[in-house]
Image: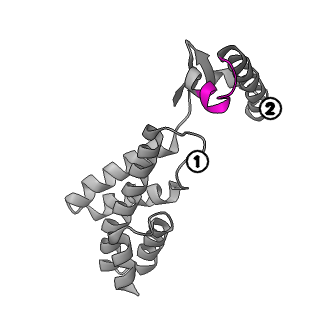
């Protein structure tokens, strides 16, 4: 995960001059590192949070959205060739991992919004496709769990609504 520090400064302090915003960002990063150091002991936050050449990076960590996308892709590949066991091995942890999109209030750019919408669409597609297989296998509770999780974020997705309506 990487953020351009100038863009971040603008989002956080649009009313400040560049120099004052930079000083505020440096102060914020210092406070964040201090807080992280308390949690990460005996490790240093500088191993994870780095600012180099104007790019603020989160290193040596895993981003759940990327893991979800990888599991989704793997599951869809298995689903296409009817590998039910492998499909479940990918989709089940993907659904368990899903906690919702990151806060849209933090990132106000189109790229972040598009990424969030793609993740939500992937969850809805996963629920629509996989729930059908789960219903066929008699795993109705699992199918409903997946569909309800998708419905919570995609109330107008035709596949999700149709599957739920068809069940009830």
Left or right placement of residue 100 versus residue 84 in this view: right
Q: Mark 2 points at which residue?
A: 38
Left or right placement of residue 45 versus residue 134 in this view: right
Q: What element carries label 1?
A: loop
Q: Name the residue under label 1.
A: 103
Residue 71 part of the magenta-drawn span = no
Report, in whole angstroms, how far the alpha carbon at label 1 lies from the one at label 2. 25 Å
Left or right placement of residue 62 versus residue 124 in this view: right
Q: How crowded is mark 2: few (under 14 residues within 10 Å), some or many (20 or more)?
A: few
Q: Where is residue 97 in the image (x, y as percent from the top left)?
A: 51, 54
Q: Quadrant of residue 121?
A: bottom left
Q: Position of residue 158 (x, y in %)?
A: 33, 71
Q: Where is residue 75 in the image (x, y as percent from the top left)?
A: 32, 55
Q: What stretch is highlighted in magenta?
A: 8-17
Q: In which quarter of the image is the C terminus?
A: bottom left
Q: Which of 111 and 45 is in front in this view?
A: 111
């Amino acid at each position: 995960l990487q953020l351009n520090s100038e863009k971040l400064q603008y989002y956080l302090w649009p009313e400040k001059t560049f120099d004052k915003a930079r000083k505020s960002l440096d102060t914020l990063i210092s406070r964040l590192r201090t807080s992280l150091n308390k949690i990460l002991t005996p490790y240093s936050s500088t191993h994870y949070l780095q600012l180099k050449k104007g790019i603020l990076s989160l290193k040596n960590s895993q981003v759940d959205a990327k893991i979800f996308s990888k599991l989704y892709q793997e599951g869809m590949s298995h689903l296409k060739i009817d590998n039910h066991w492998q499909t479940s091995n990918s989709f089940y942890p993907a659904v368990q991992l899903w906690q919702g999109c990151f806060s849209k209030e933090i990132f106000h750019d189109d790229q972040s919004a598009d990424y969030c919408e793609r993740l939500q669409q992937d969850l809805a597609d996963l629920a629509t496709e996989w729930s059908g297989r789960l219903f066929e296998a008699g795993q109705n509770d699992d199918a409903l769990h997946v569909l309800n999780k998708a419905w919570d974020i995609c109330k107008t997705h035709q596949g999700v609504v149709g599957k739920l309506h068809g069940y009830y």
